[in-house]
Amino acid sequence: MNRCTLCPRECGVDRIDGQLGYCRTDASLPISSICCHMGEEPVLSGSQGICNVFFAHCNLQCIFCQNHQISSNQGSLNSVDMSIEEAVGQIETILKGGAHGVGFVSPSHCLTQMRAIMTALNNRGWNPTFVYNTNGYDRLQTIRSLEGVIDVYLPDMKYMDNELAHRYSGATDYVGVATKALNEMYRQKGAAIELDNDGYITSGLIIRHLVLPGHVENSIEVLRFIAEELSVDVHISLMAQYHPTAAVRGHEQLHRCLGVQEYNRVIDEFEVLGFYRGWVQDLSSSAHYLPDFDNHHPFEE
């Protein structure tokens, strides 16, 4: 990290010396929450949940982000600079409670810290399923470096429109970057997923897509890319959970939840393209995925 090029921003700052690039993160371990999360896809959380490690800040700045309390690169955040020992201790407590996996959420700018946690857990005798839960804005070289290290890739594919990606997430090159990253994940894992005897995923690729209100065509293009460039055999998590935050309540399109007809059009395309593996969220899910990182457990009241 002394000339950081971990993510596609390639800021080149010396994070070890305390310099801050786009993500405003130095070489410390900025964690906003370590918790047992029950709300992920069934093969990830099951009945015991997954231990999710939420890193602070992000290499995308989505104006609609539901995790804005911890993802913003402006102002103060709900985060603590932990030691590796403190982080691993909290993770161990959750693993002892029955969680099968450890998910790293928004890890693209904290790859070095993520790998240090993984190594420490392995050195203590733990062998959980490691999940790379990313926004999809990852360098191709980074994903290549994770082959044989990450068990499950859980990327978003947010956009097939760079102008939209620029307006909503501050990334003019999102499409090119994310499609290369997903192609590499698919090369490594293929379309099949592996499950253990309890039905928990141990290896594979699951692609998430959040349908945004007013942008059905973008969602359809995302699905077409996956079908045409990867495979209709891939597991897709089609999400309807979009809920407007205070930051976009006056926005022309993002001020509202997703409409029934909008979501049905995307589901229809999902079926027409031949996808048959994965999960489709209920439209009412927009009321159930509203974390509050002011709480000890962000997903519990």
Image (cartoon, rainbow, N blue to C red):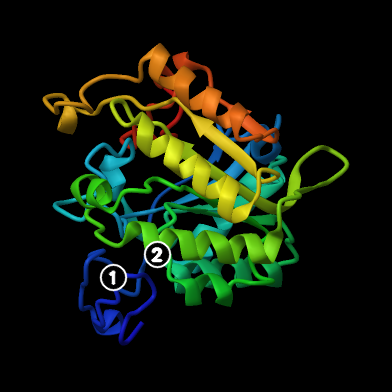
Q: Amino acid at mark 2?
A: Val
| Percent of width and height locating residue 170 | 21, 54
Q: Residues within 10 Å of mark 1 (few under 14, many from 20)?
A: some
* Figure check: 16 above or below 248: below
Pointer 2 local density, CA inside 10 Å: few below 14, some 14–19, many at least 20? some
The one nearer the camera, 117 or 179, is 179
Asked whether residue 273 is in view, the answer is: yes
Question: 40 or 89, which lies in front?
Answer: 40
Residue at the (21%, 72%) spot, across then down = 21
Q: Quadrant of residue 186?
A: bottom right
- Secondary structure under tag 1 reads loop
According to the picture, the residue beneath numbered tag 2 turns out to be: 177
Query: Along the polypeptide, which appears first: circle 1 or circle 2?
Result: 1
Across and down, in percent, residue 164 comes to 25, 45
Read off the residue under disc 1.
9
Quadrant where the N terminus sits is: bottom left
What secondary structure is found at the residue carrying circle 2?
Answer: helix
Circle 1: residue type: Arg
Determine which quarter of the picture holds residue 132.
Answer: bottom right
**Residue 285 shows up from this direction:** no
Q: Residue lying furthest right in this view?
A: 197
Figure quadrant of the C terminus: top left
Measured from the top left, where is residue 25 in percent x and y?
28, 67
CA gap, disc 1 and disc 2: 11 Å
Residue at 50%, 49% (x, y): give it: 225
Residue at the image position 64 percent from the left and 52 percent from the top: 205
Q: Nearer the observer, disc 1 or disc 2? A: 2
Residue shown at the point (48%, 72%) measured from the top left? 140
Q: Nearer the viewer, residue 95 or 282?
A: 282
